Amino acid sequence: MWIAGAGAGSCLGAGPRVAALAAFLLAAGAGSEAAAPHAAASGEVARARFLMGTRLAIETDVPVPARAFEAAFDEVARLETILSNWTTTSEITRLNREAARAPVRCSPELFGAISTALRWAEATGGAFDPTVEPLVVALGLRGDRPPPASGAPGEAPGGPAPPDVSIGGVLPAGGAPAVRLPVGWRHVRLGRRSRSVSFDAPGVGIDLGGIGKGIALDAAASVLRRHGVRRALLDFGGQVLAIGRPQGSPVWVIGIADPSERDRAIGAVGIADVSVATSGNAERSVMTPHGPVGHILDPKEQRPASFAGSVTVAGRDATSADALSTALFVMGPERGTAWADRREIPALYLWRDGHGLMQQRATRAFMDRFEGWDDATGS
């Protein structure tokens, strides 16, 4: 049984903090190249590859030509060269370096990803915002990798760093940079006819980590469908996408992870033709002199989001599920549940209280869609 949220994160590329995860995957037989297909006890065929800093696994219940798996993996690998901030040669790194000086013409994939991200930023009132790149860099959330140079040592993506901000340094006291950074989706200008992107201020930058994994999952699913695959379950570091439904069953069964032990399922749901994404800070954080810093950032407060649990969201596609799980995590259980209820979005918040007891808050759409989900609240 897949576990939604196990190992989930928002990075688009490998960094120092994924080394332990990579070692675990290699020990489990899922290395950086496609693993040999294997038949599970029930006859499914599956393959996996290490991509975007995590593991993409694809499972089907009928034999599928190897080229279908390989084409899906290759498409995700191609998107990584476009969307990942973890490499200095990616298209988005070049964009962040140049877009404050002049409009940058983009590939269809990057322009589409940024356009989609900006739509979600507007729809969520900025709770999801792809322009958190300056904050990611200022808080050192990519470990030792320096920001892309833009002409002079120490400059942030798109131009000089704001004063008094230690780019790539430790988190200042109070959990946020000492000065306001140029974070906000309205800083981005789209030239739709020229397919170009520009920034209206130095220091602006885009990080697609809160939506890129969903975009890649949808792209992989499209490749599989073009190869005739009509039933499959894709798991990308804990975000799951179901194509159709398995033979002889109305749903694929996936687990809901414990927010503090993400390899442990505390419940299960059945899904078909839907994506389920989980956002949480349980595993991916950076230790600073002020304590661990979570990787999910509150764009308005310009600090790590304060919620300490997890939120699981079901979306019609992986892109929307990914963006919504990020936004709802930032909103927190009270505001997020009310916001999602008004839009009939299936969402489940989980957290442990001061006594270690599991607490939950779910939207009406979640309870209607997953009635009787096997929870362990109070355990």
Image: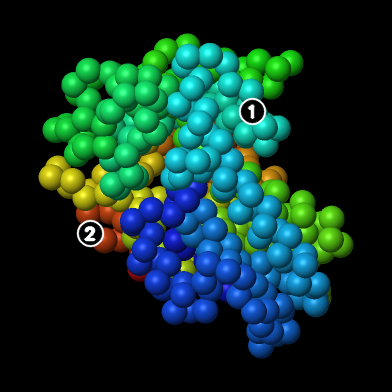
Q: Name the quadrant containing residue 299.
A: top left
**Mark 1 lies on residue:** 106
Quick check: 187 left or right of 41?
Answer: left
Q: Are marks 2 and 1 in contact (CB under 8 Å)?
A: no
Foreground: disc 2 or disc 1:
1
Quadrant occupied by the N terminus: bottom right
User: Going by the picture, which residue comes out furthest to the front?
Assistant: 151
Residue 146: give its label: none
Residue 79: where, in percent of width, then height?
62, 46
Residue at 59 percent of width and 29 percent of height: 114
Residue 245 visible, this angle: no
Residue 355: give its label: 2
Residue at 21 percent of width and 30 percent of height: 166
Q: Name the quadrant containing residue 229.
A: bottom right
User: Going by the picture, which residue comes out furthest to the top?
Assistant: 200
Quick check: 43 left or right of 341?
Answer: right
Q: Name the quadrant containing residue 41.
A: bottom right
Residue 27: where, in percent of width, then height?
44, 79
In terms of sequence position, does the residue under pointer 2 or pointer 1 come before the other? 1
- The residue carrying pointer 2 sits among few (fewer than 14), some (14 to 19) or many (20 or more) residues within 10 Å by Cα, namely few
Residue 193 visible, this angle: yes
Q: Secondary structure at mark 1?
A: loop
Label 2 – label 1 distance at C-alpha: 51 Å
What's the residue type where badge 1 is placed?
Cys
Q: Nearer the viewer, residue 321 or 214?
A: 214
Residue 106: where, in percent of width, then height?
64, 28
Q: Nearer the viewer, residue 154 or 133?
A: 154
